[in-house]
Amino acid sequence: MKKVKTLSTVLFIMAALFVGVLGISYGGFSDTLVQTYNIYTGKMDFAFADPVNISTPEETFTISMQSGECGEAVELDADISYKDKQLFITNIDTINASEFIKGNTIFKINYAIIAADDKQGIRQVAAIEGEDDAGYNLGIIDFELQSKTPVWCVESGENHWGTDTDFPGGTPDVVYQLLPDTLARFDAFHTVQPADQNGIICGTIILKQIGNLNFPEPPEIGLSSLEFDDEINMKIANSPIYGYLEIEAVYGFIISINFDQYNVNKGDY
Amino acid sequence: MNQNRSIYCNVIFKAVLLLIFGVFIISMFSFSYGYWTEKLEVKGDATIRMRLLIQNDIDIDAEMNAVNGETDLPQEIERDGVSELP
């Protein structure tokens, strides 16, 4: 009984003290002028640029290909579009697989971005302009096989067999064997220019091929590999004109772009 | 009976609490994953063409025989009305 009374007394005193401390702190808290400031940390938030702000949109989003560092850059025709943070480069001009045999193919992709939040976000990324600077390394990019069913055809003189001729034997197995799952691997680098007066930042992604494409050299295939029936083999073998096997497949790639915000020069802002 | 009812209510209460926590945690994971992985991406595809010369590596004579139904087995020779093998 005594213990219960003692405990009750202690609890009562503690409660009274807590209430008193609450009152004192409230008084101290409310007896001041309050000013509220909003300070935002910068965030890296960019989106591909609105064409309205670009003076020459056709020259801004481009893709080109060249053989070796000293090769002539050839601009490729493609359907280029973007939505917010994704840039789509589809239906690129048909490329011969032989371009990848030497292992020195280089792609260059030009694009433009702008800060998504003009008021809050960082409006300029660190620029890399020097020729000696290879740029940010974005890692390894693979060209992966997209199409499950390739398009093929065999031409021999006036005869033609393939996907568009309802060939009864279906696609020859050798067609699938000739198409690698990974066409080529590229080392990706990224350079960025300072923003212009409209806040548009132009960048270039450079893809440098690593390794060679494992492709028959010279590009030949035996008639027996096609596993055609005898009648077709006869036609191809007896034709005065050489026969060719042509295969087309779609290869795709995805490049994630990273930026460095910590090396921005004050003069660039 | 009152005790059983009390236990039952406790179990239900804990189950509902667990469910709410689980939904909350999954939502936080989804939100943070989306925020973390949202970045600029370039996606592209291209049509690659391969053209190979077809080399004739098949025995044409054998093919012709196969097409005409002929075989390499010795044929019977008919002489003076009597057939005999060579």
Image (tube, coloured by chain):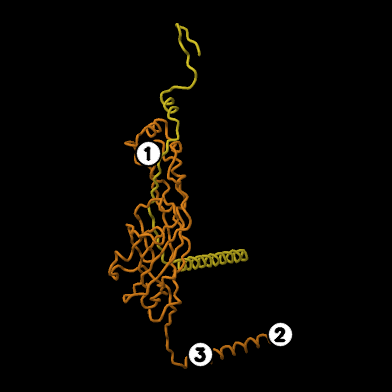
Count of numbered circles in the view: 3
Mark sitting earlier along the chain (1/3): 3
Question: Which chain does tag 2 point to?
Answer: A
Between marks 2 and 1 in the image, the one whose residue lies nearer the viewer: 1
> Are dots 3 and 2 in contact, CB under 8 Å?
no
Q: Identify the mark nearer the N-term, 3 or 2.
A: 2
Do dots 2 and 1 share one subunit? yes
- As measured in the structure, the alpha-carbon distance from the residue carrying label 1 to the one carrying label 3 is 93 Å
Give the label on residue A26, or none.
Answer: 3
Mark 1 lies on a secondary structure that is strand
Q: Do the residues indicated by labels 1 and 3 lie within the same chain of the protein? A: yes
Residue A163: x %, y % from top left = 37, 41
Callout 3 secondary element = helix
Residue neighbourhood size for the residue with mark 3, other residues' Cα within 10 Å, grouped as few (<14), some (14–19), many (≥20) = few
- Disc 2 target residue: A3
Residue where numbered disc 1 is placed = A243
| Residue B2 place in picture, x, y as percent | 61, 66
Nearest to the observer: residue A197 or residue A118: A197
Q: What colour has chain A?
A: orange
Q: Quadrant of the C terminus of chain A?
A: bottom left
Q: Report in which chain the residue with disc 1 lies.
A: A
Circle 3 or circle 2, nearest the eye? 3
Please identify, in this view, whether the residue under mark 1 or under mark 3 is nearer the observer. Answer: 1
Amino acid type indicated by mark 2: Lys
Identify which amino acid the numbered label 1 is placed on: Gly
Colour in which chain B is shown?
Answer: yellow
